[in-house]
Image: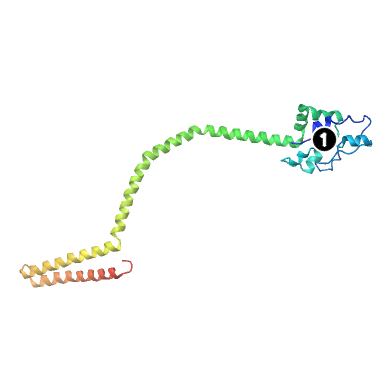
């Protein structure tokens, strides 16, 4: 918070002259935190009360703005010497004065609000714990039952897809054409044997044989085109 001059330095100084009416503090416009006390008309008082702040104050982690410093000095200038000494020696009086500063009040209010919000969030999280446990149990049930069935169905669909892709692949198409050509060739030979064995007449033979050979050569040309195609 705000640091005043050290109590040990104050105790080491002799008491001020009773007749002095000058203030120890600079006017509110002075913003430097290291400003020394202004000198009194007495030369001895000037030597005794020209006390600087301790050197370690320059290492304070927080910097007071000029306006804030002026406001604090304005609060202190109306206090008597005894009141200032009490602030340096009495911890309770120092804390009471510190808590009366507006900047400290604002920081304390912000701290209290953040504490309340944190507590409320913690309560909300604790209230949701039963719901989280229920959701966790439901996930476990889904993982052990519905998920297993869904995975099995997915695997079955994957197998069907692979079979369909394999069936309509160029290699499979060429193989089926070759099988159809061989089957048509066998049927042509069978029709020819039937003619030789006089199981059919010449008119029936010509009609069947022509149809089979036409189908064979059409498939043979398709098979040749498929084998020479780049996609094969």
Residues 122 and 5: in front is: 5
Residue shown at 34% from the left, 43% from the top: 149
Percent position (x, y) of residue 53? 80, 38
- Residue 84 in view (yes/no): no
Percent position (x, y) of residue 163? 29, 55
Looking at the rendered image, the quarter that the C terminus falls into is: bottom left
Percent position (x, y) of residue 203? 10, 72
Looking at the rendered image, the quarter that the N terminus falls into is: top right
Q: In which quarter of the image is residue 195?
A: bottom left
From the image, tell me which residue sits under label 1: 75
Number of numbered callouts drawn: 1
Drawn side of residue 164 relative to residue 190, left or right: right
Drawn side of residue 67 relative to residue 133, left or right: right
Residue shown at 83% from the left, 34% from the top: 76
Drawn side of residue 16 relative to residue 176, left or right: right
Residue shown at 64% from the left, 36% from the top: 114
Residue shown at 35% from the left, 45% from the top: 151
- Residue 99 in view (yes/no): yes
Q: In which quarter of the image is residue 179?
A: bottom left
Q: Residue furthest left?
A: 198
Q: In which quarter of the image is residue 138?
A: top left
Helix, strand or loop at disc 1?
Answer: helix
Percent position (x, y) of residue 167? 28, 59
Mark 1 Cα-neighbour bin, 10 Å: few <14, some 14–19, many ≥20: some
């Amino acid at each position: 918070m705000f640091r005043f001059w050290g109590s040990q330095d104050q105790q080491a100084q002799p008491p001020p002259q009773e007749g002095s009416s000058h203030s120890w503090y600079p006017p509110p416009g002075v913003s430097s935190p290291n400003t020394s006390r202004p000198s009194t008309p007495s030369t001895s008082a000037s030597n005794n009360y020209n006390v600087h702040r301790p050197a370690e104050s320059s290492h304070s982690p927080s910097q007071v703005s000029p306006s804030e410093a002026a406001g604090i000095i304005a609060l202190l200038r109306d206090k008597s010497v005894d009141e200032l000494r009490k602030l340096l020696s009495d911890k309770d009086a120092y804390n009471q004065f510190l808590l009366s500063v507006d900047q400290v009040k604002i920081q304390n209010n912000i701290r209290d609000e953040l504490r309340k919000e944190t507590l409320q969030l913690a309560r909300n999280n604790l209230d949701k714990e039963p719901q989280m446990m229920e959701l966790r149990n439901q996930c476990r049930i889904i993982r052990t039952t519905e998920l297993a069935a869904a995975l099995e169905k997915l695997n079955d669909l994957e197998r069907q897809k692979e079979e369909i892709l394999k069936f309509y692949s160029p290699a499979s198409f060429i193989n089926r054409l070759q099988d159809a050509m061989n089957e048509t060739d066998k049927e042509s030979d069978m029709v020819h044997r039937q003619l030789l064995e006089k199981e059919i007449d010449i008119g029936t033979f010509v009609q069947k044989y022509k149809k089979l050979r036409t189908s064979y050569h059409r498939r043979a040309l398709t098979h040749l085109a498929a084998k020479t195609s780049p996609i094969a």
